[in-house]
Amino acid sequence: MWLTWSLYLPFLLRRTDRLSMAAGVEARVPFLDHRLVEYLWAVPPQWHRDSAMEKTILRQAVTGLLPEQIVWRPKSGYPASMTAEYQTALWRRARDLIATPSSPVLELVSVRTFDAYLALHDGDLSDWTAVQHVAYVLELDAWLRINQVRIR
């Protein structure tokens, strides 16, 4: 969670700002109001995970305010170009990382579990979440290396 808030979110906000300003549009990010973020940070973690559907807390909050077909429609995220070549390259980098005992992220991630995860999702282009998980591990390793952070 910390990496998402400290690294990925600023990247997304800068990209949004550049792209919107290039088109002469000012984009707003209403769900990043500090009061809302502080409130949701205090919500028990199980509330975030209790449902199989993402954004359940938000959906429940607007039930009755918006039409049901809007409230409960599946999320349609930013389009991504998921290809077999991209996943193959990502998996190759992940397996290289596992084979390098000096990789700093291996102090945080179980090699056996990560290797099993790679095997389980190899070639499955329907699961974008798996690709994101693998990319996060690789990005975390790169960040630890660049900043010369040692866990132990």
Image: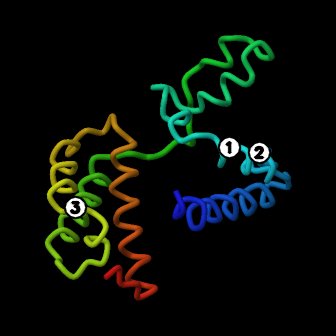
Residue type indicated by callout 1: Leu
State if disc 2 and disc 1 touch (CB < 8 Å): yes
Q: Residue at x 77, y 16 (%)?
A: 66
Q: N-terminal of the two: label 2 or label 3?
A: 2
- The residue tagged 3 is 110
Q: Which residue is mark 1?
A: 40
Q: Quadrant of residue 77?
A: top right
At mark 1, the secondary structure is: helix
User: The disc labelled 3 sits on which kind of residue?
Assistant: Ser
Q: 21 or 44, which is in the foreground? A: 44
Horizontal arrangement in the rendering, residue 94 relative to residue 72 (left or right):
left
Element under disc 2: helix
What quarter of the picture does the C terminus occupy?
Answer: bottom left
The residue located at (57%, 42%) in the rendering is 78
**How far, Cα to Cα, is label 1 from label 2?**
6 Å
Asked whether 29 or 148 is in front, the reply is 148
Q: Earlier in the sequence, mark 1 or mark 3?
A: 1
Q: Amino acid at mark 2?
A: Leu
Separation (CA) of disc 2 from disc 3: 35 Å
Q: Residue at x 22, y 56 (%)?
A: 114
The residue beneath circle 2 is 36
Mark 1 burial class by Cα count in 10 Å: few <14, some 14-19, many 20+? some
